[in-house]
Amino acid sequence: MSNTGLLKSSIGRKFAMALSALFLMIFLLQHLVINLSAIFSPDTFNELSHFMGTNPLVQFVAQPILIFAVVFHFVMGFVLEMKNRDARPVKYAKNNGAANSTWMSRNMILSGSVILAFLALHFIDFWIPEINTKYIAGDMSGLNAEGGFRYYEELLHKFHDPIRVAAYCIAFILLALHLLHGFSSAFQSMGQKNKYITALSKFGVVYSIAVPLGFVIIALVLHLAH
Amino acid sequence: MNLKLKIWRQKNANDKGKMVDYPISDVSPDMSFLEMLDVLNNQLIEKGESPVAFDHDCREGICGMCSLYINGEAHGPDRGVTTCQLHMRKFKDGDTIYIEPFRAKAFPIIKDLVVDRGAFDRIQHAGGFVSVNTSGNTQDANSIPIPKADADLAFDAATCIGCGACVATCKNSSAMLYVSAKVSQFALLPQGQVEAKDRVLNMVKQMDAEGFGNCTNTGACEVECPKGISLDNIARMNREFSKAILDGREK
């Protein structure tokens, strides 16, 4: 069976969604750790940001893998949603989904779409200006006009606008809801054995709440730091 | 009890179909749901109207023939029962009850509430069996040692009656719970090992070809399953599938 053939199988697609999700969850954790440093030590945040922004392994190996994982997870998510809608052409007149499943599990496409909208904002806010400064203007120094690192200053500036902070918080609440189903779902898709299920699900709940909450706290602290 | 029934009526596979209101009175709380429909049908026949077509056979909760999506749930609001074992005492006087067929592209409607679940049979034909040489000196199955825990899990999986509630209740119309039960009952036993890899690949391939949706692990199937088939079976099928793929089986 070829790789493309694998993606034609419903279980193959489950595995692919789960694998890309696991990669994104690891990415999210390292992103949180770096951002958290901004609260405790702007200098550490500057140094870590400069390393991540200029290290060739991060920039030209990890970053393309990340972009691929993000695009794949979203595209496959929407493809699956369309296929699943097609599998029931006539809807029920009355359907009581709440009787047998969680809101989170039934609305992954909704929470995912909000996260996608947030990513669009994140690209405009962060990624496109970074690429522009580093690879188009050719300024790899990471310094501002005064000769210090620009990263913390830029971060602080982003969280000045209360509307952006609010949008940021809403997106991360939806991310928490997405993860509350997605974390354990990924392991189920990859065929977890039930002896690990309890410990993994508990860790999943902690992860799903703690990570988005961490990002929200950073946004609020930096907003109030103004 | 007096009830307001809203029932899906559809003359045949090509008819568009619609929900029709049927008030019914003097329903005993001790009737089964199907007996209540029998009473309604008697009244419809007496009035010269066409009775509501619905599936049923054993009426003992073991054949998997009865279906019905009642008030938004497969086999109605009770747990661990088929529609024939659902009793009217689960409803209140004056209730409005929606009665719809199991809906999925892979389960086309034949008439009213009767759907064609032949897709399940075709999945079973694709690999849900063990090839046994019946030359006359067949080994007694009980002479093969099987760990008790595995035997119990295999039996639990084998209690699936193929009613299709998992598909009906799944927001994606996925048949994963059914197929995983059929894969698991053999994957757990020594007799199933010879054909294990081909079985899971062939059954999953047939499942996809029938037009069922993709599993997103909502767990609704497990809750609505009249036989309590566990979601663990789906995880086991996923493991069986990846083992077969890693083994390089071409399908």
Image (tube, coloured by chain):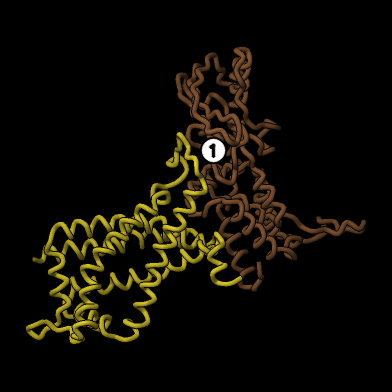
Label 1 marks which chain's residue? B
Q: Quadrant of residue B102?
A: top right
Q: Quadrant of residue B243?
A: bottom right
Q: Percent position (x, y) of residue A146?
A: 7, 83
Up/down of B226 relative to B11, above or below: below
Q: Percent position (x, y) of residue B134?
A: 88, 56
Colour in which chain A is shown? yellow
Depth check, front residue: A162 or B48: B48
Depth check, front residue: B211 or B194: B211
* Residue of label 1: B74
Residue at 69 percent across and 64 percent down: it is B198
Up/down of B56 relative to A118, above or below: above
Q: Secondary structure at mark 1?
A: strand
Depth check, front residue: B6 or A211: B6
Residue at 65 percent across and 32 percent down: it is B55
Q: Disc 1 marks which amino acid?
A: Ala
Instruction: Mark 1: give few (<14), some (14-19) or many (20+) Cα within 10 Å.
Output: many
Give the residue at the far left of this rendering.
Answer: A146
Residue at 73 percent across and 60 percent down: it is B192
Q: Percent position (x, y) of residue A203?
A: 40, 62
Q: Percent position (x, y) of residue A196?
A: 51, 63
Colour in which chain B is shown? brown
